[in-house]
C-alpha cells in the first residue's frame, strides 16, 4: 500500500522562523517521502526569505494577508489535491516529526478502513514527555481505554478518539473530497473541532497512533485568559456548539443557553467579572450571527464543503 501513495505535507507559517528549519528538515528526512507545501500568512520575521534560501524545493504559497489557520490550510489542501495527493499531512510550524512517524500513520490507515484522520502522539519540545494539552484532549476524547496505552513509545496501540487537535493530522484525500476543507467562519481556533464533527457526520473515524511521534514546542502549562482573549474564546466555543451538524439546530441552541447560564453563575460567584462580561459580549455577538451560522450549518453538510 504505502509504496504507491503520494503524500503532501502542509505547514501554515506565520512569523515562525525560529521553528521552520527544524520543522521542514524533519519532513525532508522522513523515512517516507513527503512533498512539502508552506502557506505563509504574510510573515514579517524573515520566514519567507529563509524558505526561499534554504528550502528551494518547498512549494511556497504566499498570502498577502493573515488568513488564519483554517483558510490558509485550505489553500494548501486545494494545491495538494490538484497534484493528485493520496494523503495530506497537516503539521504546525512549531512541530517536527520523527523519521518513522509518517510511515506508522499510514500503517494505521491500512488497518482501519474507516479512518479519515490519524494523529501521532504529540511530545513536548524536549521530546521527553507527552505534550500537556495533547494529553488533556486525548484523555477527554478517548472513546475507549485510557491515555496510558498511548504513552509507551514501543507499543503499536491505535486509539479511536472523538477529537484530537490538528497540530499534526494525516488525512486521507478521499475523506477530504467528501468532508471538504476547514470552515472559514473560524478565524483561529475551533476549526479543528468543527472539522472533526464533519468527519463523524460523513461516517469516518479519528485515531491516535501510539509510537508515531512528533515534538510540539509550545508552553506546557494551563492557559489563563483576560477579558479580550476570553471573549473571543467563548465566541468560538458558542460557534463550535452551534455548528455541530451531528445534532439538531434547536438542541445546539439549548446547549449554548445552558452553557451561558452555568458559566455566568460560576464566574459571578468567583468574582471574575471580566469573564462574566466577556461571556455576555460573546453571546450577543453570536445572537447577531445566528442567521449566518444557520446557513453555514447547511453548507457544512455538503460534499467538499468550503473547498
Image: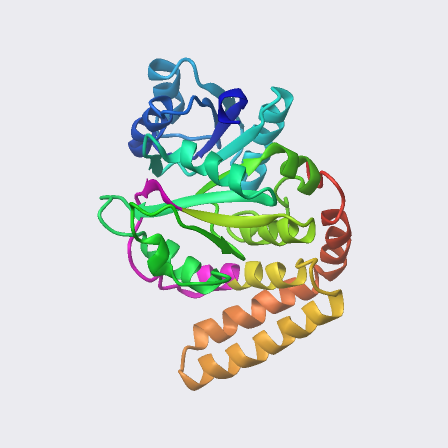
From this view, report whether residue 169 is shown above or below residue 56. below
Q: Residue at x 69, y 48 (%)?
A: 202
From this view, report whether residue 153 is shown above or below residue 56. below
From this view, report whether residue 217 is shown above or below residue 98. below
Colouring chosen for the image of the structure: rainbow
Residue 303 appears in the figure: yes
Q: Residue at x 67, y 62 (%)?
A: 242
Q: Nearer the viewer, residue 42 or 302?
A: 302
Q: Position of residue 190 (x, y in %)?
A: 54, 53
Q: Residue at x 22, y 48 (%)?
A: 128
Q: Position of residue 177 (x, y in %)?
A: 68, 35
| Quarter of the image where the C terminus is located | top right
Q: Position of residue 126 (x, y in %)?
A: 22, 44
| Side of 198 relative to 225 (left or right) | right
Q: Which residues are magenta?
A: 210-233
Residue 215 lies in the magenta-colored region: yes
Q: Quadrant of residue 13?
A: top left
Residue 289 lies in the magenta-colored region: no
From this view, report whether residue 158 is shown above or below residue 255. above
| Side of 39 relative to 127 (left or right) | right
Q: Nearer the viewer, residue 134 or 94?
A: 134
Q: Residue at x 43, y 59 (%)?
A: 137
| Side of 261 relative to 271 (left or right) | right
Q: Residue furthest bottom?
A: 269
Residue 39 appears in the figure: no
Q: Nearer the viewer, residue 119 or 287?
A: 119
Q: Position of residue 127 (x, y in %)?
A: 24, 44
Q: How many callouts does the rendering have?
A: 0
| Side of 303 relative to 89 (left or right) | right
Amino acid at each position: 500500500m504505502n509504496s504507491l501513495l503520494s503524500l503532501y505535507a502542509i505547514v501554515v507559517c506565520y512569523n515562525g522562523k525560529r521553528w521552520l528549519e527544524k520543522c521542514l528538515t524533519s519532513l525532508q528526512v522522513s523515512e517516507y517521502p513527503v512533498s512539502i507545501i508552506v502557506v505563509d500568512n504574510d510573515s514579517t520575521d524573515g520566514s519567507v526569505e529563509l524558505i526561499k534560501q534554504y528550502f528551494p524545493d518547498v512549494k511556497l504559497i504566499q498570502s498577502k494577508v493573515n488568513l488564519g489557520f483554517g483558510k490558509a490550510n485550505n489553500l494548501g489542501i486545494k494545491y495538494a489535491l490538484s497534484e493528485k495527493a493520496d494523503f495530506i499531512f497537516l503539521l504546525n510550524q512549531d512541530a517536527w516529526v520523527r523519521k518513522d512517524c509518517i510511515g506508522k500513520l499510514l500503517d494505521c490507515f491500512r488497518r482501519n478502513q474507516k479512518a479519515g484522520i490519524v494523529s501521532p502522539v504529540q511530545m513536548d519540545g524536549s521530546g521527553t514527555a507527552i505534550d500537556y494539552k495533547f494529553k488533556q484532549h486525548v484523555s477527554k476524547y478517548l472513546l475507549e481505554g485510557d491515555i496510558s496505552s498511548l504513552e509507551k513509545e514501543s507499543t503499536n496501540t491505535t486509539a479511536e478518539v472523538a477529537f484530537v487537535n490538528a497540530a499534526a493530522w494525516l488525512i486521507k484525500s478521499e475523506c477530504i473530497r467528501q468532508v471538504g476543507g476547514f470552515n472559514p467562519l473560524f478565524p483561529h481556533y475551533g476549526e479543528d473541532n468543527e472539522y472533526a464533527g464533519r468527519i463523524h457526520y460523513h461516517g469516518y473515524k479519528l485515531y491516535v497512533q501510539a509510537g508515531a511521534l512528533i515534538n510540539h514546542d509550545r508552553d506546557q502549562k494551563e492557559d489563563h485568559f483576560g477579558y479580550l482573549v476570553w471573549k473571543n474564546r467563548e465566541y468560538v466555543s458558542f460557534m463550535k456548539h452551534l455548528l455541530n451538524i451531528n445534532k439538531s439546530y434547536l438542541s445546539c441552541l439549548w446547549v449554548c443557553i445552558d452553557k451561558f447560564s452555568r458559566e455566568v453563575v460560576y464566574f459571578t460567584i468567583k468574582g471574575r467579572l471580566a469573564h462574566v462580561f466577556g461571556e455576555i459580549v460573546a453571546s450577543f455577538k453570536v445572537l447577531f450571527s445566528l442567521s449566518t451560522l444557520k446557513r453555514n450549518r447547511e453548507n457544512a453538510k455538503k460534499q467538499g464543503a468550503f473547498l
